[in-house]
Image (tube, grey):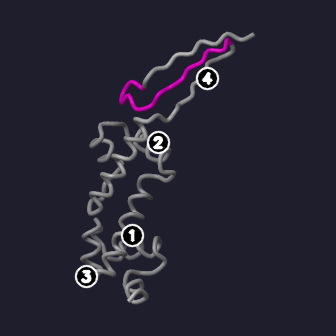
């Protein structure tokens, strides 16, 4: 029979992840368990991204805003939403841009600036990768 000593503790920097440690006599097993608090944090990060689509939020700036490490931010977000922060943000910006193309008479350059791109050609490339068409072709196809 193997002795088991179970202890629960919180991750000391953020208190966001709950760990379960079991000592089995042959070694220690540490399992990170997503808890309610880390899911809430991921949703707060998502909400912040969605409310600030015009900003090119970096992992560094998001981590600073939420007072957590960059690694914790990336892990928490990916665990909750299944995709990296950057991919989620980029797709959200391109989907919002697609809606704006249909609802407004706006140039691609203005649209690029609205969604945090300094360069219209880089914006067009990102738009095409997400939506399958350039912004101009997307507008023509959906008129």
Measuring from the top left, give residue 111's x and y in whole percent.
28, 75
As displayed, is residue 118 above or below residue 15? Answer: below
Disc 2 versus disc 1: distance between alpha carbons?
24 Å
Q: Which residue is mark 2?
A: 75
Q: Is residue 111 magenta?
A: no
Task: Give the foreground label among 4 and 1.
Answer: 1
Q: Which element carries disc 3, helix, strand or loop? A: loop
Q: Which residue is mark 1?
A: 95
Disc 4 versus disc 2: distance between alpha carbons?
20 Å
| Mark nearer the N terminus (4 vs 2) | 4
| Mark nearer the N terminus (2 vs 1) | 2
Q: Quadrant of residue 16?
A: top left
Q: Which residue is mark 4?
A: 29
The residue at 37%/75% (across/down) is 98
**Disc 2 and disc 1 in contact, CB within 8 angstroms:** no
As displayed, is residue 114 above or below residue 32? Answer: below
| Mark nearer the N terminus (4 vs 1) | 4
| Mark nearer the N terminus (3 vs 2) | 2
| Mark nearer the N terminus (4 vs 3) | 4
The residue at 34%/69% (across/down) is 96
Disc 4 versus disc 3: distance between alpha carbons?
56 Å
Callout 3: few (<14), some (14-19), or many (20+) C-alpha neighbours within 10 Å?
Answer: few
Residues rendered magenta in the picture: 11-25
**Disc 4 and disc 1 in contact, CB within 8 angstroms:** no
The residue at 38%/47% (across/down) is 43
Q: Which residue is mark 3?
A: 106
**Disc 4 and disc 2 in contact, CB within 8 angstroms:** no
The residue at 47%/46% (across/down) is 80
Callout 1: few (<14), some (14-19), or many (20+) C-alpha neighbours within 10 Å?
Answer: some
| Mark nearer the N terminus (3 vs 1) | 1
């Amino acid at each position: 029979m193997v002795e088991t000593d179970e202890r629960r503790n919180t991750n000391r920097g953020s208190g966001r992840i709950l760990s379960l440690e079991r000592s089995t006599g042959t070694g220690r097993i540490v399992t990170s368990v997503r808890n309610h608090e880390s899911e809430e944090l991921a949703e707060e990060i998502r909400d912040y991204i969605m409310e600030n689509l015009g900003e090119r939020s970096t992992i560094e700036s998001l981590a600073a805003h939420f007072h957590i490490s960059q690694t914790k931010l990336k892990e928490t977000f990916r665990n909750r939403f299944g995709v990296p922060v950057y991919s989620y943000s980029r797709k959200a910006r391109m989907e919002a841009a697609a809606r704006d193309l249909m609802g407004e008479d706006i140039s691609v350059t203005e649209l690029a600036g609205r969604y945090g791109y300094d360069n219209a050609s880089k914006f067009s490339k990102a738009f095409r990768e997400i939506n399958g068409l350039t912004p101009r072709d997307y507008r023509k196809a959906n008129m």
